[in-house]
Image (tube, helix red, strand yellow):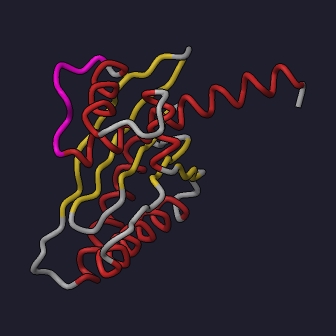
Amino acid sequence: MIILGIDPGYAIVGYGLVEFQNNRFKVLDYGAITTDKDEDMSVRLKHIYSELQHLIDLYHPDAVAIEELFFNKNAKTAILVAQGRGTAIVACANKNVPLHEYTPLQIKQALVGYGRADKKQIQYMVRMILNLKEVPKPDDTADALAVAICHGNSYHASNIMDLKTGI
């Protein structure tokens, strides 16, 4: 299964593509879609949409995993990030790729086994699980890979449960 992980945003959208097969992960690609702060928001969102559509056309993922938003301070930033997240969701929906959403807590638990893990712990586990020489940069890229790993682990666990229950 090929999984596209997305760390949503509007200035930087992290993405990570992994193949999950036989309970192992293999990195296919990762990076960041960046937008110019001097551009109108509509142009920035169009760029995010186009780049994600290109990645989907290039890799044909079987699933997309995206991080749910968590903000407790700046409402204006939350709204802008939500616009970027919505754009990413529509880009995937228009390509008919199944979308799965995970909270930061779920992602941390899936990678570290602890829902309050810090960013360094997550990055370390991404590097180890994917057998990378260094932590991917920017942080949004490592976060996107973490979301993809979370989905692979969640998908695998749900299939095991289906086998045990016969559902």
- Magenta stretch, main secondary structure, is loop
Decide which of 123, 10 is in the foreground and name it.
Answer: 123
Residue 119 colored magenta? Answer: no
Q: What stretch is highlighted in magenta?
A: 131-138
Q: Is residue 71 above or below residue 137?
A: below
At horizontal 30% and vertical 59% (from top left) the residue drawn is: 51
Quadrant for the N terminus in the image: top right
Does residue 3 appear left or right of residue 157 in this picture?
left
Residue 5 image-quadrant placement: top left
At horizontal 81% and vertical 21% (from top left) the residue drawn is: 163
At horizontal 80% and vertical 28% (from top left) the residue drawn is: 162
Farthest residue to the right: give it.
Answer: 166
Does residue 81 appear left or right of residue 62 in this picture?
left
How far across and how far down the image is residue 12, in percent? 23, 60
Farthest residue to the left: give it.
Answer: 38
Decide which of 110, 42 is in the foreground and name it.
Answer: 110
Does residue 112 appear left or right of residue 46 in this picture?
right
Decide which of 125, 131 is in the foreground and name it.
Answer: 125
At horizontal 37% and vertical 78% (from top left) the residue drawn is: 79
How far across and how far down the image is residue 61, in percent? 49, 42
How far across and how far down the image is residue 70, in percent? 43, 61
How far across and how far down the image is residue 154, in percent? 60, 33
Residue 135 colored magenta? Answer: yes
Q: Is residue 121 above or below residue 78?
A: above
User: How many discs appear?
Assistant: 0
Quadrant for the C terminus in the image: top right
Decide which of 42, 112 is in the foreground and name it.
Answer: 112
Does residue 34 appear left or right of residue 147 in this picture?
left
